[in-house]
Amino acid sequence: MTVDRGAGFEAVFLDPVGRTVQQRWADAALVVAFEDLPPVSALPVVPGRRWGPGLWWSATTGRHVAAGSNAMRVQLMVLDRDPDVTGLAGRPVRLLWRTPGGQVRSWVPQLFARYSDGTALLADCPSHPDAGGERALGAAQAVAEACADIGWTYRRLPPLEDVLAANLKWLAGYRHPRNAGRPGLMPAVLEAFARPRPLLEGAEAAGDPIEVLPAVFHALWHAKLTTDLRTPLHERVLIGPQGRKTPGQADAAG
């Protein structure tokens, strides 16, 4: 999609009291905390689709983030586990631009993530590489240009491998701080896995597995412990300490 570079990009968003604001994109990016804003427009509901709009509780922010599809929830889960991410929002901004022929185009990226260095990511979550057709691919090019202009990043995030997605969904169920357990339990869990050992063996070394396993999963979610998440989780999977790969662990598996 060709963009009229002279016209520039505009941002449309809702302010904290719900009023619609339109501002030059480069200015808005400097001063607007998009991670704190609600969706700029309603999340679409597609008849017949198994997954619909909902909310994701973020362990990063302690708040809910709007999610419009299962693919979007999965990518929220990945970003929520990234230690460099400090803020998350669903569809907080619409970008406007003109083509060289004067036609107005717009796009609402599905996700916004703020990083600890102040930069940000705008992202879409297609269920397959060609999802959205030519319009989505053309908009992706334009939004990528808008982000590059201000030192941000835009990505169409690819779906996760099935095993990795299943493991992360399981661990996400233990992301809330309550799963760290009673005082003193987490240090015992980390000590039990100070060297890589099978999941159940380490849990039994730390105490009653019924009490300990939620804390182990909580530690895995927050990367206080590590394992190869591209392998199905089971009682014999090797769990190791933070910063140390267990045997066979892939670089991106965490």
Image (cartoon, helix red, strand yellow):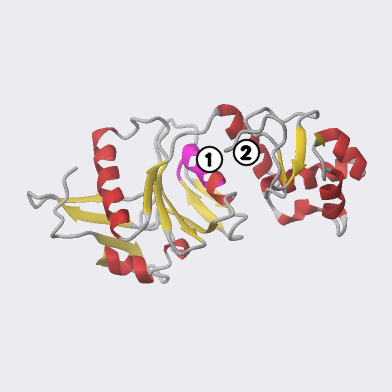
Q: Which mark is residue 186?
A: none
**How many C-alpha atoms fall within 10 Å of the one at disc 2: few (<14), some, or many (≥20)?**
some
Span of residues in magenta: 68-77
Q: Amino acid at mark 2?
A: Lys
Choose the circle earlier in sequence order: 2 or 1.
1
* Quadrant of the rendered image containing residue 183: bottom right
Q: Nearer the viewer, residue 22 or 77?
A: 77
Q: Nearer the viewer, residue 252 or 86?
A: 252
Instruction: Relative to 210, say whether 37 is above or below.
Output: below
Percent from the top left, x then y, of residue 209? 88, 39
Q: Main secondary structure of the magenta part?
A: helix
Magenta span contains residue 72: yes
Number of numbered callouts drawn: 2
Q: Quadrant of the C terminus?
A: top right
Percent from the top left, x then y, of residue 242? 72, 48
Q: Quadrant of the N terminus?
A: top left
Q: Nearer the viewer, residue 151 or 175?
A: 151
Along the horizontal axis of the image, is 69 left or right of 96?
Answer: right
Percent from the top left, x then y, of residue 46? 39, 36
Tell me the SS state at disc 1. helix
Tag 2–tag 1 contact (CB < 8 Å): yes
Q: Nearer the viewer, residue 238 or 2?
A: 238
Percent from the top left, x then y, of residue 193? 82, 43
The residue at 90%/45% (across/down) is 206
Along the horizontal axis of the image, is 99 left or right of 71?
Answer: left
Q: Which mark is residue 169?
A: 2
Tell me the SS state at disc 2. helix
For disc 1, the marked residue is 74
Q: Amino acid at mark 1?
A: Val
Instruction: Relative to 40, say whether 242 is above or below.
Output: above
Question: Can you see residue 167?
Answer: yes
Instruction: Relative to 183, say whether 46 is above or below.
Output: above
